[in-house]
Amino acid sequence: MTEASHVPKRLKVTAAVDISKVGAGFAITSIALELEAQVEGLLIEQFRALTDAAKTNCPVSKALSATPISLTARLA
C-alpha cells in the first residue's frame, strides 16, 4: 500500500494454520490470513486490488504455493 502512496495508519494481521495428519506424519493443509487495515483515502476497490497483489506476490506465499492460502481483508 505504501508503494502505491497509501500509507496505512494501522495493520492487524492474523494467521491460522491448519496442521493435519497426512499419511504417517503431519502437514500444513491450509493457511487462513485475516487483515484489518486502516488506510485513509483508499477506496475498497483499490484496497482489494492491493491486498490480492500482495498475497500473490508475497515471497512466503510463493514458497508455500502447494498449500491453500485464503485472505480475508477489510478496511476499518
Image (tube, rainbow, N blue to C red):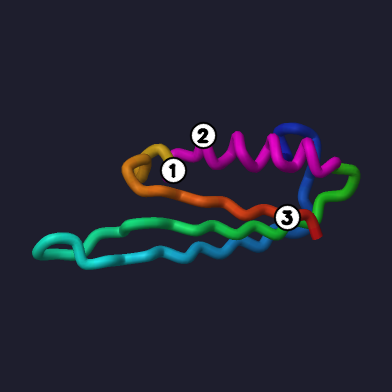
Snapshot quadrant of residue 76: bottom right
Q: Label 3 crowding class (10 Å Cα cut-off): few <14, some 14-19, many 20+? A: some
Q: Position of residue 49 (x, y in %)?
A: 69, 35
Snapshot quadrant of residue 38: bottom right
Residue at image point 73% right, 55% down: 74
Residue at image point 21% right, 67% down: 21
Q: Are marks 2 and 1 in contact (CB under 8 Å)?
A: yes
- Amino acid type, mark 3: Arg
Residue at image point 66% right, 63% down: 12
Q: Label 1 crowding class (10 Å Cα cut-off): few <14, some 14-19, many 20+? A: some
Indicate yes or no whether the magenta region holds residue 12: no
* Mark 3 secondary-structure assignment: strand
Residue closer to the observer: 42 or 32: 32
Residue under label 3:
74
* Mark 2 secondary-structure assignment: helix
Residue under label 1:
61
| Pair 2/3: label in front | 3
> How far apart are labels 3 and 1 at the CA level?
19 Å
Q: Start and end of the magenta stretch? A: 43-60
Residue under label 2:
57
Snapshot quadrant of residue 52: top right
The total number of labels drawn is: 3
Residue closer to the observer: 3 or 42: 42
